Every structure is written in C-alpha cells, then in structure tokens.
Image: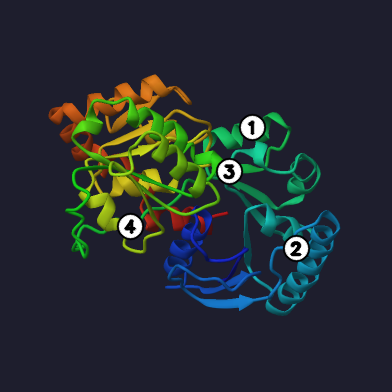
C-alpha cells in the first residue's frame, strides 16, 4: 500500500510525534511518504520525506494565497504518486489537501474551538473520513451534523529497556510538567497551585518546554521568590530521563485534544494529576485508579491534589503500578492497524 502523511513539519509537537510513530510502524510493510511544508525535523520517521517548501506566512491575504499554493503543490504530488491513503494532520494540512479533490482522511487534533468555524462547517465535511483524537471531539463534530467520523487515540511506544542518561539529582525530588509555554497549557495555574502547597517545602517543580510565555512565567516565578524551587528548563531531547526521575507528573491545561504528554507520563509509570479539561484527560485518567482528575482551572483543587499525592506514598505507588496497564490499548501496533483500516 502507498500511504501519504501531510503535515506542516516534524518539529516538536503532539501531532508531529504521532506521524513520527505511525510512519515508522507503517513503513515496515508499506511505502510511506511524509509531505512537509516546512522541512523542520525533530523526530525520527519512516519512509520518504517530500518537502514542498511552503512555510507558514503572516497576514490574511498572504495566508489565503498560501493555502492555494499548497493545494497546487499537493495536487501535483497526489496526481503523480496515486496514493492509496492520504492522511492530513491538522487544519493547515487538511484544508489544502481536501481542496485538491482527492479522498483525504483528515485528522482533527484539538478542541474544535481553536479551528476556523468556516473551515470546520464547510470544508472539513468534504473529507473522505474525519479522524478525531478523542471521543469528546468526535461528539462536538457530530453535534454540528458531521457524521463520517471515527476516533483513533494517540499511539504510545513503551520502552522499558531505556537506561537513564542524565542524572537529575540537582533537581530531585521534583514535580514534572511538560508542554509549550502557551496560554493553553495554563502553567500559571500550576505555578500558583505549587506556591500554595505544602509539598513545595520538600520538592521542586520542573517545566519542560519552550514558548512565547517564557518571560511572563519567569516573572511570575520571580514575584513569588521561587527561582530556586521552580525551573523553566527549556526543550529537552532526553525527556524520558525527566519522566523516570519525577515524583509525579501534572497536566494543568485549559483544553487539549488528546494530550500526548499524559500518555507518555503513564508509559513511564509516573503518578499523574490532570485537570479535567476538554478534551482528552477524562479518556486517559480513571480518577483514583491511575491518577487524579481535578476540576479544570481550580487552583485550590490542584494544590490539594499535589499535596495529597506527594504525601501519600501508598497512593503514589498504586498509580505507578497501574500506569502502563491503563494505556496498553494505545500500543503503537494496535493504533497503526486502526489507521490502515480506514
């Protein structure tokens, strides 16, 4: 089978990570092409990269022209290669792909409120099939009258043979959070909740990731005098070292699609806390079984959850023991078969 993935780039990000994993798995038995607008690559991949050199632009008129430029380049490739399946990840990829007229399987990766209402209502339904990353997102589309949908959750590769490369003794013990320094991830809430916790007297908070909110978050940390307790450590290639050495993992997002970082934390046997935000966490965390779900944007509830989990060793061990078992249905081989069956 000849398969195409269309995505902006393979730079750091959840959708990019999924394409990375699926391409490696599917290329074992199929011919895989990854069509990029921007040849930024941070992940390993399987198959062949096709860079159409059509990077993102700013300005409303420029963006419209860019969509049609991408459409023209994609149509040329689709005509030449005659793919059996075309998977387009995120709006930037599925919009021009659908406009080519070819049967495209569109992958919706986030809460639909972050996407263009016009595109969701008028363009997205023209896709051959729509794959959502969580059941809640599928329900949102169904309410809009879009019915040719299917949920396929993100895959995870579990590696229990990994050996720690970087000893993080200078930070230990620590709470771990991972994500772009962006409003969506709500690290302000996490910082404020940590500030009010009893646990902060005994451990640190590490936030792994980069983004536009770095300065603002650092200023907030400084205003609390917590520069030696809360660390914005930047982007890390050896992220597994951080999961494996953490006391617990916290996801504080305002909204998600299906948070990869949460299933990655579970795959590394982390004790987890997550805000019950739309969408994803409630489909991953079974409250009190493999982690704690707290009310979205509730600072006091998150503080209490941090203290409860840190000081209750029995609960922490329960969550760690249940972590990998709770996501066994998301193994890469299983999820790859679901994509092939579309």
Mark 4 and mark 1 lie on one chain; the one further toward the N terminus is: 1
Residue 239 numbered tag: 4
What is the x, y in percent for residue 112?
A: 65, 39
**Front tag of 1 and 3:** 3
Residue 102 numbered tag: 2
Mark 2 and mark 4 lie on one chain; the one further toward the N terminus is: 2
Instruction: Give above or below for 64 relative to 255.
Output: below
Instruction: Say which of 231 and 186 sits in front.
Output: 231
Q: Residue at x 46, y 35 (%)?
A: 188
Q: Secondary structure at mark 2?
A: loop
Give the alpha-carbon distance from disc 2 to disc 3, as whole Å: 24 Å
Mark 1 and mark 3 lie on one chain; the one further toward the N terminus is: 3
What is the x, y in percent for residue 286?
A: 34, 29
Give the alpha-carbon distance from disc 2 to disc 4, as whole Å: 38 Å
Residue 110 numbered tag: 3
Q: Quadrant of residue 74?
A: bottom right
* Residue pointed to by mark 1: 140
């Amino acid at each position: 089978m000849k398969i195409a993935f269309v995505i902006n780039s393979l730079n750091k990000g959840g959708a990019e990570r999924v394409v990375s994993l699926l391409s490696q798995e599917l290329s074992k038995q199929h011919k895989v092409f990854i069509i990029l607008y921007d040849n930024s690559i941070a992940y390993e991949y399987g198959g062949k990269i096709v860079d159409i050199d059509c990077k993102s632009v700013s300005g409303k008129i420029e963006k419209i022209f860019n969509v049609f430029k991408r459409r023209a380049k994609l149509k040329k490739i689709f005509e030449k290669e005659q793919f059996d399946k075309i998977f387009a990840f995120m709006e930037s990829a599925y919009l021009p792909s659908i406009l080519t007229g070819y049967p495209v399987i569109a992958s919706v990766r986030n809460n639909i409120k972050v996407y263009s209402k016009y595109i969701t209502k008028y363009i997205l339904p023209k896709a051959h099939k729509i794959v959502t990353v969580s059941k809640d997102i599928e329900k949102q589309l169904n309410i809009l009258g879009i019915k040719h949908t299917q949920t396929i959750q993100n895959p995870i590769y579990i590696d229990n043979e990994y050996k720690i490369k970087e000893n993080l003794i200078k930070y230990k013990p620590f709470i771990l959070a991972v994500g772009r320094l962006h409003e969506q991830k709500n690290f302000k809430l996490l910082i404020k909740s940590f500030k009010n916790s009893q646990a902060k007297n005994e451990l640190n908070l590490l936030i792994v990731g980069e983004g536009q909110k770095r300065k603002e978050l650092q200023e907030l940390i400084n205003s609390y005098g917590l520069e030696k307790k809360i660390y914005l450590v930047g982007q890390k290639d050896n992220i597994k070292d951080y999961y494996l050495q953490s006391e617990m993992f916290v996801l504080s997002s305002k909204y998600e699609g299906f948070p990869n970082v949460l299933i990655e934390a579970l795959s590394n046997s982390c004790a987890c806390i997550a805000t019950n935000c739309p969408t994803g966490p409630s489909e991953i965390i079974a409250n009190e079984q493999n982690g704690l779900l707290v009310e979205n944007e509730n600072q006091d509830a998150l503080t209490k959850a941090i203290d409860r989990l840190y000081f209750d060793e029995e609960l922490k061990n329960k969550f760690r023991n249940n972590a990998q078992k709770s996501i066994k249905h998301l193994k890469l081989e299983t999820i790859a078969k679901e994509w092939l069956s579309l």
